[in-house]
Image: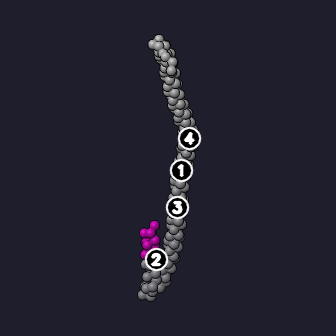
Amino acid sequence: MPKCTNNKLRLCLRISLKAIMKLQGCLSRLVLMYSSILVLAELESFKMEYANARLECNVADERANILASEVIGLEEKARRLRSNELKLERQLENSQAEISSFNLYHWCIHQLVLIVRYYMIVMNHLQCMALEDTLLLAWETSSKPACRPASKLNQISSSILFILFICNLI
């Protein structure tokens, strides 16, 4: 081994220290670069997450717009259906009113027909009674009161009762 002097050792030590310092600088730069790379990788990860979240937001916005347009369409359809329902209710009320007035009209016609029938019956009975009166007067003047049949009197009283019955119905 060569003999080293103090100066040489100092020089070697200085050179070694400079080399160590350079290595430390390189190491710190490497650490800094590594941490920068980690930060960049983390930043890139955040950028990817942000881009994914943005895409999801855009998809959600599109779905919301589609749903909003469907809701608007359904509301318009519901409004049209309600309008048609109200129109049909009015038509139903009008139809029911027509039916009831039609029924009232037919009831009135029926009652009028009954009244005319009763009137005809009463007039017929009145004519019969007038004829009976004339026949009875003619018979009374021509025959004796003891010979009158009782059935004729019963017939006259039944005709009067029938007329009174018909008048009470009207």
**Residue wearing tag 4:** 63
Please tell me which of labels 4 and 2 falls first in the chain.
4
Q: What residue type is labelled 1?
A: Glu
The residue that appears at 43% across and 72% down in the rendered structure is 164
Q: What residue type is labelled 2?
A: Ser
When the figure is inspected, residue 19 is found, relative to residue 59, above or below; the finding is above
Specify the label residue 103 is tagged with: 3
Residue range highlighted in magenta: 159-170
Residue 118 location in percent, x, y? 50, 70
Q: What residue type is labelled 3?
A: Asn
Would you say residue 19 sits in the magenta stretch?
Answer: no
**Alpha-carbon span between mark 4 and mark 1:** 32 Å
Quadrant of the rendering where the C terminus is positioned: bottom left
Please tell me which of labels 3 and 1 falls first in the chain.
1
**Alpha-carbon span between mark 2 and mark 3:** 35 Å
Q: Which amino acid does label 4 sit on?
A: Arg
Nearest the eye: 130 or 98: 98
Please tell me which of labels 4 and 3 falls first in the chain.
4
Crowd band around label 4 with a 10 angstrom C-alpha radius: few (<14), some (14–19), many (20+): few
Crowd band around label 1 with a 10 angstrom C-alpha radius: few (<14), some (14–19), many (20+): few
**Residue wearing tag 2:** 159
Please tell me which of labels 4 and 1 falls first in the chain.
4
Q: Which of marks 2 and 3 is in front?
A: 3
Secondary structure of residue under mark 1: helix
The residue that appears at 52% across and 56% down in the rendered structure is 96
**Residue wearing tag 1:** 85
Residue 79 location in percent, x, y? 54, 45
The residue that appears at 56% across and 43% down in the rendered structure is 70
Nearest the eye: 18 or 94: 18
